[in-house]
Amino acid sequence: MVTTMANDIQSLLGDKAESLLGFDSPKIPKERLQLPGPDFVDRVFMQSDRNNRVLGNLSWMLKNGRLGGTGYLSILPVDQGIEHAGGASFAKNPDYFDPENIVKLAIEGGCNAVASTFGVLGIMARKYAHKIPFIVKINHNELLTLPNSYEQILFGTVEQAYDMGAAAIGATIYFGSDDSHRELIEIAEAFALAHELGMGTILWCYLRNPGFKTDKDYHVSADLTGQANHLGVSIEADIIKQKLPENNGGFLALNTGNSSYGKLDKRIYSELTSDHPIDLCRYQVANCYMGRIGLINSGGASGENDFVEAAATAVINKRAGGMGLISGRKAFQRPMAEGVKLLNTIQDVYLDEGITVA
């Protein structure tokens, strides 16, 4: 029986509903995956090398907010003041220049956690660090350098995040970039220290190289982002953040003519994926140790159809076996009440028992 909420989501999705809600033939069957659930920490992380304090903080995140106890995550990330410039990010709603409104939106929106910068979370730590899990983003790409460069640099220390009471740290690595080796070494060391101190680790596994744009933008291909995820879990990220895949065949496209890039097996495209968005996302999940490390997809930029796009992204992630969404601009670039409604729309997908893993 389809629930009322499922009917609401189906109505919101419109002509996308049949394709996304009716898909039932994934290339990688769900039985091969470790799926999100109330027992996820006990079932997956209890047998890992993470210490008791890490398990406690991961449990706190998974038990907090509207999705608490489901095994799914809804996280509000607001680091765009650095990553995309403050004016460009907050001109639509200047209230979010004030860090307290960022934290309030996460709480009012029923999020499991709030992810932001040292400055944003540090200025509000004494008031809110015990009320909602803090995820401190420790590195950023700043856009004031002329010409703009694309390089993730540390803005503080792991110890600072620990001292402010953070539940986890987050970081970005630009895989494929000239700077990726330094970033990989730096963040691997930061994650090791964070685990030692008892904090969880979340990695933004992004691709960055102009060579990835040819006939398509392969920064969002399932095969390249999947490999980025596989590198991310290798440095013991507890959660992977990745953009939703929009195409496939990045390795194929970069191995044409006289070029040679990476390694591939054509069964990636025939036996492990199809062109369906849920299959493409499932390949990302598979590269996260078959779901043992949770995959959260990003919500993307704000636009004209934010509620439809947010719901569709959540449906794709959930049905692929992912752990949730981390959506910022769609929520904070509008009045708070509307932002709360958008976050709740995402959460409704994960609360809806009628929307199942494919």
Image (tube, rainbow, N blue to C red):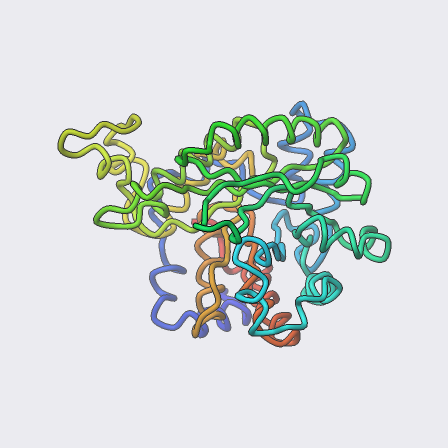
Q: Where is residue 240 in the image (x, y as percent from the top left)?
A: 54, 40
Q: Position of residue 60 (x, y in %)?
A: 75, 45
Residue at the far right in the pictured view: 126
Residue at (44, 62) in percent of width and height: 312
Residue at the far front in the pictured view: 146
Residue at (13, 33) in percent of width and height: 257
Image quadrant where residue 333 sits = bottom right
Count of numbered marks: 0
Q: Position of residue 2 (x, y in %)?
A: 49, 66
Vertical side of 26 occupied by 198: above or below:
above
Vertical side of 54 occupied by 350: above or below:
below
Towards the viewer: 74 or 168: 168
Residue at the far left in the pictured view: 257
Towards the viewer: 119 or 31: 119
Q: Is residue 249 left or right of residue 43?
A: left
Q: Position of residue 187 (x, y in %)?
A: 59, 31
Residue at (34, 71) in percent of width and height: 15
Residue at (56, 74) in percent of width and height: 92
Towards the viewer: 31 or 86: 86
Towards the viewer: 78 or 233: 78
Image quadrant where residue 138 sits = top right
Q: Is residue 51 left or right of residue 35?
A: right
